[in-house]
Image: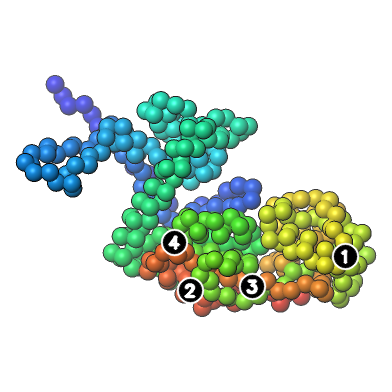
Amino acid sequence: MMPAPTRTTSYSEPISFVPPMDRGSRTIVHLPSDRWFFQSARHKPIRPMNIQRHYDPDMDWFLSDEAAAIVPLLAAFDTSAREGHVTRAADQLGMPQSSVSRRIKALEQLIGVPLFQQVGRGVSLTTAGRELHEHTRDLIRELDYAITTVRSHADPDSGLVRFGFPLTLGPQSVPSLLADFHRTAPRVRLHLVQAHGEALAEMVRDGRLDLAVMIPPPDDLPVTVLGHQRLLLHVAITHRLAGRDEIRLSELADEHFVASPPPYHVRKQLESYCKEAGFDPYIAFEISEFDTIRAFVAYDLGIALLPPAEAVVPGVVSIPVTGTSERSIGLVVGTRQPSPAVQRLRDHIVKHADRLLMTTDSPPNC
C-alpha cells in the first residue's frame, strides 16, 4: 500500500506593516514576525520504555495521552479567553477563524465539558473554562518567553519585543520613533499594543509586554522618566472661551464635558481637578478614542481636558488651565531580565525621548 499522503501548511507574511485593527479601547499592530503554530494533535511523543531496575525520579513522569493532545490546542483557548472574541483571537494568532474554532471544539471534546458560551458577538468562559484558564494561562506565556529568550540570546541582533504605548500617543511620535529603530535593527520583531494606562500596566506585570510608555507610570514597576506632559482645555473655535490665553477650572462648572471612560487616568484627573475647584464635571459624552473626543469638541458638543494633540485638529483650540499639574511620561520595563532586543529598544527610546515630548510645548492650535 502507498503511504498516506502527509499534508503540511506553511504560513508566511510580507515584510511590511499590517494596518492597525480597531479594538475599542486598544489597537494592536503586528510588525514583521515569524509566527509559530502548534503541531496537529495527532502527532504524539513516543514514550521511552522504563527498563531501569532501580527507581529514578527523573524517569517517572511522562506526558499523558490527554495532555499530549491538549497542548497544541492551548494557544487557541488562551487567546480566545483573553480576547473574549474568536475573530480577534484568530487575528492575534494569524490564522483563520475556522481553525481557532476547530481547536476550541477539539479541546472541549477532549476534556468533555463546554469551555465557552456565546455572549452577544463575543464569547465568555464557562465555569469549567475559567477553572482551566486559571491553571493554564501562564503556560503559553512562559513557553513563548522561553523560546524568545533562547532565540534572542543566540542572536542579539534579532528577537521579539512586545511594546505598549498609551492612547494619547501614536499618530506621529511613536511611528517616527519606531521607524528609526527599525532602520537600525531591521531583524528585531515588534509586537505593538496601544491601550489605556491600567491595561498597559497589567500586561507588563503579567509578562505580556516587555516595555511600555505610560503617562503616568505606576509605582510598582521599574521606570525611567522621559519627561512630563500637561493637560490642556480643548474647546471649539466658536466656543465663548476660545480666545482666552488661560482658563481657571472654576470657570468650567457649567460646561458640558466630553471625556474618556472612568478607568482612564485622564478621566480620573479631570474629576480630581474639578472636585478641587468645587464642582463635579457634567459628562455629556463618554468616548474611549481621544481623536473622536477632539472631533466632538470641534462640533461644539462639549469641552475636553486632554494632552496636546500631535497634529493640528481643525476647529479646535487648546488652552492652558490653572490648577492642574504635569504628568510624568515614563518608560516601564518588566521585572524579568530584559533580552538584548528589549534592551536595545529601551536604549533607543531613552535616547530619542524628545520624539515623545514634542507635544508638551505645542502652542494652541486652531
User: Contact, CB < 8 Å: mark 1 with mark 3?
Assistant: no
Label 3 residue SS: strand
Q: Is 258 left, or right, of 44 in this rendering?
A: right
Identify which residue is drawn at 46% across, 69% down.
Answer: 345
Marks 4 and 3, the one that precedes in the sequence: 4
Label 4 residue SS: strand
Image height of 213 relative to 193, above or below:
below
| Cα distance between the residues tagged 1 and 2 | 44 Å
> From where the camera sits, is residue 179 visible?
no
Q: Nearer the viewer, mark 1 or mark 4?
A: 1
| Cα distance between the residues tagged 1 and 4 | 45 Å
Q: Nearer the viewer, mark 1 or mark 2?
A: 1
Dot 3 crowding, Cα within 10 Å, few <14, some 14–19, many 20+: some
Label 2 residue SS: helix
Label 1 residue SS: loop
Q: Amino acid at mark 4?
A: Val
Identify which residue is drawn at 77% across, 72% down.
Answer: 324
Marks 1 and 2, the one that precedes in the sequence: 1
| Residue wearing tag 3 | 328
Q: Amino acid at mark 1?
A: Gly
Q: Position of residue 257 (x, y in %)?
A: 83, 57
Q: Quadrant of the C terminus?
A: bottom right
Please tell me which residue lies in front, 101 or 310: 101
Image height of 240 relative to 91, above or below:
below
The numbered dot on residue 278 is 1
Marks 1 and 4, the one that precedes in the sequence: 4
Q: Amino acid at mark 2?
A: His
| Residue wearing tag 2 | 348
Q: Nearer the viewer, mark 3 or mark 2?
A: 3
| Cα distance between the residues tagged 4 and 3 | 23 Å
| Cα distance between the residues tagged 3 and 2 | 19 Å
